[in-house]
Image (cartoon, helix red, strand yellow):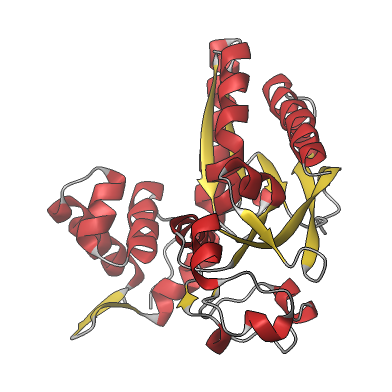
Amino acid sequence: MRMPGSLDWDLLQSLHAVLEAGSFSAAARIRRLTQPTLGRHIDQLERQLGAPLFLRSPRGLVATDLALAFRPHLADMSAAAEAAARDATGVASGEGGVVRVAASDVIGIEVLPAMLTRFRAAHPGIDVELVLSNKNEDLTRRDADVAVRMSRPTQNSLVAKKVGDLTIGFYATPEYLERKGTPTDFDELEGHSLIGFDRDFPAMVGDLSVGRPITRDIFALRTDNDVAQLAALKAGFGIGACQKQIGRRFGLTPVMADLFSFKLDIWICMHETLRGSPRMRLMFDHLAKELAEYAAEGG
């Protein structure tokens, strides 16, 4: 492999897109290029490096060790470039700009929309980017600007504020309980259709019990998507866990509330270097206030 003195960032962006998307066609759509143009970018990089970046197999495109070695560095570079673009937008406009907010799937879909709508009404010059994932976005490399997290952040470089907590318990629709009966203890719970996880169990599940260890085989519907779990719960599939506020909003009935519940902290975080940015501070303070009020509703 040859070691070039420098590599074109445009070509590296195409490599990053292929690594993330898994195919040339999907990567071309991400980059808003034609597929032949993106292919030429990869060919040019391979010529400069003197080694292949991808191999084709019956399973599709396979990244070589060389391509995979680039992956963490390209992720950092991409996050930095996106953060720089957001920052430059705010400076160029004089007021406003962009704030990228990270949250879990359920918080982002069921809790934040009304809060962000009120924020936009108060600050119409600020655009919002919302990234949803149950993985914590890396604020140290600016994958997001402001994050809502369900556990205490561990990075020392973050400004973080705990604004409350959420109570999670078992719920079901009244129609399901009328049809199947309401369990009053863990033995009776075993006879019901439970909604839960498939393969990706949150760490806190290991500290919980429903009369026996929580394993995937106890669930009649298994999915690692929290929003899909909630949708099945609202549809009356069976008994599942959700926030007290959400259960109340959709008319769900608490089940075994005296025997099973747990709490999750709500933290608002941002990188300490952003504390001087007016728009970041506005979003941080807005979410802190609104989520504190939301948490209080569950008291």
Instruction: Out of 209 and 156, give the one closest to the viewer.
Output: 209
Q: In this view, does 242 lie to the left or right of 36?
A: right
Q: In this view, does 186 lie to the left or right of 48?
A: right
In x, y percent, where is residue 66?
41, 76
Residue at point 68%, 44% (across, down): 245
Q: Give the x, y percent position of residue 11.
A: 33, 53
Quarter of image, res 100:
top right
Q: Residue furthest top?
A: 94
Residue under the image location 40 percent in, 72 percent down: 67
Displayed quadrant of residue 258: bottom right
Residue at the image position 31 percent from the left and 63 percent from the top: 45
Quadrant of the drawing holding the C terminus: top right
Which residue appears at 51% of the width and 68% of the height?
A: 238
Left of 201 or right of it: where is 227? left
**Residue 228 drawn above or below residue 87:** below
Along the line of sight, the residue nearer the viewer: 148 or 180:
180
Which residue is the extreme one toward the left? Answer: 36
Q: Nearer the viewer, residue 46 or 210?
A: 210
Q: In this view, does 5 lie to the left or right of 246?
A: left
Residue 100 seen in the figure? no
Tell me residue 256's x, y (percent).
Answer: 74, 68
Q: Position of residue 218 (x, y in %)?
A: 57, 85
Give residue 241's quadrant in the image. Answer: bottom right
* 163 relative to 182, above or below: above
- Identify which residue, 264 or 248, lies in the foreground: 248
Compared with 41, 200 (above or below) is: below
Q: Is residue 120 among the parts visible in the rendering?
A: yes
Quadrant into which the N terminus falls: bottom left
**Number of callouts:** 0
